[in-house]
Image (spheres, rainbow, N blue to C red):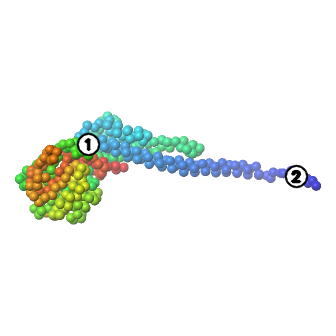
Amino acid sequence: MRYPVRNARRRPGDTAQGGQILVLFALGLLVLVGGVALVIDGGNAYVQERGVQNGADAAANAGADVLAERLFGETRTDGDVLEAIRAVADLQAFGVRAYYTNVFGDPINAGGTAVPVEHAVAVGSGDVPLRAQGIHVAADRTFGTTFGRVIGLDSFTASADALAIAGKITGGYFMPVVFPVNITDCSGSGDLGVGKSQWVIADPGIPPAHPIGQEYILPMCKTDDGSFMVLNLDGVVNNCADEVLNPTTMQFDEFPTDVASDNGNNCAKAMADAVNATKHGQVVLIPICDAVECNTDGGSHAYYHVTGVVGFWLDYMEYSNNPTNSLCQTHLNTDGELLVTITGNGSSSCIAGWFVRFVTAGPVGPGEIGNADAIGIQLIK
């Protein structure tokens, strides 16, 4: 049996609906591609942004490191700053622009005066301006997209800023002792010794060998009540050995400042044992006090007038009740090298080592950089 074949008829609107579906499909595909582009290229943009920020931080730190060397009196030029920054920029493959700032991060002109950023002295302009202690870096990197090209986004640019400053260090891990600046020596002879501006700064040498230069012996004098020049930096009394073995980071708000002493009757011996067991051959940060209040009469309630921080390559610490302790007097060591007391002989307890120019990461403050002052480099943006 044969059945008649009927011709299929298109209903009105079938063609329009098919076209609409095609348009919706195309739009959906475009949205899908856009979403993929957002996920993949957006994620890459985030990675690029972080990379540029890290690179800008490194470039600013590199420039500030050159300024730190300049603050120490080394011959460093605008070209040296530019070279240090470009070395990082080339390694990280980004473009970079930089200008000089003061210690507060303000853009400065050639005379060192704070000015609007458009008038700041650019790194690479030829001269380092007066009072230059900071480097502001602007970095950028242009990178291609993957799926973004489909929606007309061929490339993105990642940008970042960074600011690093160099100056007198005001914070870090400190040895809980205080060094004298031109104080009367422990013998009571009235000898004011060699002032800080005349301390010989040693050449670092080649580690682990000790620095090359004059090794000094710094007295730890007793006050009238028997306390030694030991600081209470953590607020806990009579834990001097723990402050050496497990130091806590701290920051002085400003200089000069008064810092309380610790109970030296027990502290000096315990501290000496801890220092000799763990700190020989290390560069440590040690506060210094001035001639006015560096040898007080308050005993365990004494306060020392701290004016700054020095870097010191530590050899040994010696404690004794013997007022003519041989290791605290000028003498030759076993290598035939002369150790010189910073003041006259007569100390029973002391610290020996070399003053060194020391740059470390840490908070900094304003003020002229003096001989032996430790310098910090701080990333503040």
Instruction: Return the disc, 2 or 1, that comes first in the chain's sequence.
Output: 2
Residue 206 tag number: 1
The picture places residue 310, in percent across and down from the top left corner, at 22, 50
Residue extending furthest toward the top:
126
The reply, left or right, for residue 129 in relation to residue 270 is: right
Instruction: Identify which amino acid the numbered label 1 is placed on.
Output: Ile
The picture places residue 237, in percent across and down from the top left corner, at 21, 65
Of discs 2 and 1, which sits in the foreground?
A: 1
> Is label 2 in a helix, a strand or a loop?
loop
Q: Is residue 288 visible?
A: no
Rounded to the nearest angstrom, the CA distance separating label 2 from label 1 is 102 Å
Q: Residue at x 16, y 45 (%)?
A: 335
Q: Quadrant of residue 78?
A: top left
Q: Residue at x 17, y 64 (%)?
A: 266
Crowdedness of circle 2 by 10 Å Cα count: few (<14), some, many (20+)?
few
Q: Is residue 66 visible?
A: yes
The picture places residue 293, in percent across and down from the top left corner, at 14, 56
Q: Give above or below for 302 relative to 378.
A: below
Instruction: Identify which amino acid the numbered label 2 is placed on.
Output: Arg
Residue extending furthest toward the right:
1
Q: Give above or below for 259 relative to 374.
A: below
Residue 6 tag number: 2
Residue extending furthest toward the bottom:
237
